[in-house]
Image (cartoon, rainbow, N blue to C red):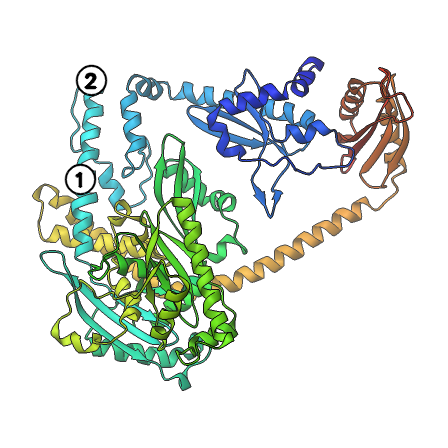
Amino acid sequence: MNDDEDKKIIENNNESQNDSENNSDLQPEIGNTSSNSNPNTENQPKDENNQENKVIHKKEGRLHIYVRQDKYKGELKSKNWVGRLYVNGKQKISSSGTQNLEEAIPILEKWFDDVLLEAQSTQQQNEPKTQEKETKPEVKTQKVENLEEPKKDESQTKKVTVLNKLKGISLFQKKGDGKKGVDAKKQAKDFYNKFFKSKVSKLSVAGEEIAGLDITKEGIRVCQVSQDKEEKWILDKFSYRLFDQDQMNENIFDSKDYITEEITLALANAKIATKNIAMSIPVTSAIIRVVTSPLMSDEELQKAIETDSLWENLVQLADNLNDYSVFHQIINRDSKKNTMDILFVASKLADVNAYSNLAKKAGLNPVIIDVRCFTLKNAHDNCKFKSLTDQGGSALLELSSDENYLMIIHNNIPVITDVFLRQPEKDLLKNFSSATASSSENDAVIRRYSMQIKQALTDYEAKYEQKISNIQIVSSLKNVKDIIPVFKKNLQTVGFYLFNPLEGIQVPSYNVEKTNIENRSPIAPVLGLGYRKLDVFGYYKFVTAVKNINLLPNRDAIRQQGRLKFLSGFAAKGLAGAIAGIYLLLIVVSFFQISSNKEKLLQFDQVQSEFDVINVKYSKLMKQKNEMQRSMQLGKLVNSNQTRSYRALAQITRSVPLRVNFSKLTFDGNENFVIEGMAFSDQDILNFISNLNGKELIEQASLAAMKVDSQENTSGSNNKKGFVINCKLKVGT
């Protein structure tokens, strides 16, 4: 790095800013910056804060150097300089590891050269593939825009599942030139998408038999639904059991013996024979977010998830990521903005396993664990609201002594706002009545509740420019009809209704008496679970994201078992003679895999428990190991530093240029020197730092601060510049 280049970086900040503004692809990374950003140190030059908000272009404009502006609690997550480049249509980002611009530039330039060298080497190895993509850009475009089809690597030899083997079979391969080969592959993909992802997938969903199980502190509800030839829903089986509160503890899992007995009675009363059930966890036990990330293929996304880098960057969790069960679904891809929206749902493994084990204790097989708010949305989506004549948007409000939240459905994605109530306020809400509505305490609780709803509606309408006219209330409170008029009084522009999840649903005569109740809204969660299907082929993946949520840790094994079971039955029925031989093979393979998966499912709880114990022991041992290593390292260093400090002082002395003198030298006796002095120019200081970094004993020298000598005439040209340099010695020298 020469002097002219350094001066150009400092003097042309405005030009760099203009370049970054014209380069639209940089804006999502940089974000909005504030003019009141704090300096790193008191003596730091004023230019440095301005540079942190700008993009510096190097390497003929291909290397962008900037400071990321993403913040946590109002502060930048990192002030280190970051480099970015685009190679082969992909974005690559690397941190310099330093906040010093002069140090960051050569580091990032070397990284830039290494990346380009690696890309050129890879391109030479894959020369035929590159040429084919360049001559046929329409094939590449098709792969990017087709959200249903993940990328394929024809040279890949590893096959994860038996279904992947089917994917690799070319049913339309023809001998001839390269173009015919590409057309044949395209036909095979089209056939796969049309057959497997539509017909077979939809058929498998329709044939699944799953019951819904809703567990609350109040009681349990079970149901099973079906569809007629016109695809209208029928409530085939339904039952509920209200708990004897004298036998219930504050934590429902402390009463699991009693709850499992009630589950068995409810299933028997409803005559539900299937063991496969769908459950839900409370909203308070889940983390639900829609995050935006750079556009990636399915393979790139999976790789980012496997390394934990994606969720660590996009979602800040309070605990270790390994403590959560995570579900994700791509809900939108924007090729123009080069971004995509991902639905992120997570819950503590302990909570998920607690609900799962409760069902297993009752002899059931949980195949789906959803979140309560999504089950309400599922029930809402399958209703025909004859009573609502207003054309405005609708929202759902869960009102209870436990969970309280407002859910607005926007473009099929829930926008959830928590309604905060303290426990005394929840008790007042539970005991509210029309007779006590005039009391100051009761009035304050309802008014505060209403204001939170109003604020949520205002924020939504301001952001999306859509008005919410109706709120459907889901509540098991006995006094809910006394509360609704008070809500209407506080929010006169919004209509409040008790949610009727059975509106538009066929109820057979034998279930009429069970459902003939004034408040049907508590049926909504279990009905929403009853609509759920295991979706072993990913049919709902291509319909809507929120119909496919499953937080079970072993959901992939369950889905694979379901695929194999369906494919085996599909082959046995002989629906396609051309592929009968393939499915006969699948029957054999599936037998062993189903047996293996069953054993794994039975042993899952035991293995999980053993893993937790071993993991705790491992963590303790690793902590002890690290402490011992630090002690041993310190022991090696506890000796006289006479020779080391003398050699270091000698090398520092030999590094001082002619026009530099230092007035103070501080050594902490371990690894760090602090040098203070004066110089005639910035270049003299940079030469001093460069000389220090070239010495054998010095690992790193960097500028900590600068100041102009106040004793000199500040308007003169011979101002001396004070400096503070930090030097770090190499360990073990």
Residue drawn at (40%, 40%) of the image: 301
Q: Which sits in the foreground, 143 or 371?
A: 371
* Image location (x, y in percent) of residue 498: 30, 67
Quadrant of image for the C terminus: top right
CA gap, disc 2 and disc 1: 26 Å
The amino acid beneath tag 2 is Asp
Q: Which sits in the foreground, 166 or 339?
A: 339
* Image location (x, y in percent) of residue 221: 29, 73
Badge 1 is on which residue?
Answer: 194
Question: Contact, CB < 8 Å: mark 2 with mark 1?
Answer: no
* Image location (x, y in percent) of residue 446: 45, 69
Count neighbours of disc 1 (C-alpha within 10 A) and say few if under 14, some if 14 to 19, many if 20 or more: few
Residue 253 versus residue 300 in the image, above or below: below
Residue 270 figure quarter: bottom left
Residue drawn at (86%, 31%) of the image: 676
Badge 2 is on which residue?
Answer: 177
